[in-house]
Amino acid sequence: MIDVRHLSHSFGPHPALQDCSFHLSRGEVLFLTGPSGAGKSTLLRLLFADLPLQRGEAVVAGFPLSKIRAAQVPLLRRQVSMVFQDFKILPLRTVYDNIVLPLQVRGMDKTHADRRVLAAARAVELENKLESSCVDISGGEQQRVAVARALVVNPRILLADEPTGNMDPELALQIMDIFKKFQNYGTTLIIATHSPELILRNPRARILRLDQGMITQANWPGAILNKFSSAVPLAAYGGGARHDSTEERDG
Ligand SMILES: Nc1ncnc2c1ncn2[C@@H]1O[C@H](COP(=O)(O)OP(=O)(O)OP(=O)(O)O)[C@@H](O)[C@H]1O
Ligand SMILES: [Mg+2]
């Protein structure tokens, strides 16, 4: 479902991602950790074709991103949703307008779309704010709008960049439970987070740590530690280096 091979990215002379390789199958969840500036957002933006590939390859939902043409990007994004770290919601539009947008793009009829919007809004506890303008709601609520907009399309792949960073812990766990449901339905998830509590809640999850753009820790053999990094097993998260060799690959 996601195959990343020797992916590197630089902003000018500054390397943000260096020689990253990992594979994720359908329905797997990956937590992306690492300090500020480690390259988490860069990696997610590359997988969403929000940044052009410079070096290496990433095959996402069957699309080799090094060769993807501009006209194919909307087709990729029919299958891949992203919750941006800065939300990227339309501030002057209502909560409803923001959540329904990806369904309108797909040409879904209003009755069907409204039902989906209401379900997504309920899941993030925003059903009473649907008519509010997004400038009039809090940061945590705006983040929930971004989460609902990403989930409303039932994506095959969800890329979520600090999706619960502005929420209180209770709500953050609730959002994680929603993500888990999607995982059970086969959605592949990558969640960038600084929060160990969220990671510990999902003991089956893959965990990958980036430092200065390099993979320095991982708990499954589908990730390749950068040869220049000092690799340490991820015992801190209780999982240790779990090497289940029966991993299936679905390309
Ligand atoms: N648009 C950009 N232009 C120039 N440099 C950038 C840009 N985006 C990211 N960088 C740099 O690339 C590196 C990786 O940044 P990135 O945003 O991927 O880190 P991050 O792990 O997501 O950090 P955080 O936890 O703070 O969100 C940083 O050094 C950052 O300053
Ligand atoms: Mg970031």
Image (cartoon, rainbow, N blue to C red):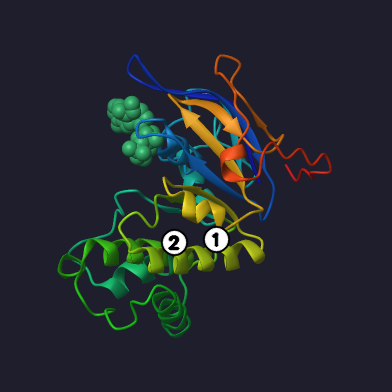
Residue 194 x, y percent position in the rendering: 41, 45
Distance from Cα at disc 1 to Cα at disc 2: 8 Å
Ligand 1 positioned in quadrant = top left
Residue 218: % across, % down: 61, 35
Query: Which picture quadrant has residue 23?
Result: top right
- Report which residue position mark 2 lands on: 150
**Mark 2 surroundings within 10 Å by alpha-carbon count, few (fewer than 14), some (14 through 19), many (20 or more):** many
Question: Total marks drawn?
Answer: 2
Q: Residues within 10 Å of mark 1 (few under 14, many from 20)?
A: many
User: If you read the primary sequence from the N terminus, does the residue marked by circle 1 or circle 2 appear first?
Assistant: 2
Give whichever of 171, 41 is nearer the camera: 171
Determine contact: label 1, label 2, CB under 8 Å: yes
User: In this view, which residue lies farthest toward the right?
Assistant: 246
Query: Where is residue 58 drawn, in percent x and y?
Result: 58, 34
SS class, disc 1? loop
Residue 75 % position (x, y): 53, 51
> Which of the numbered marks, if any, corresponds to residue 155?
1
Q: Amino acid at mark 1?
A: Pro
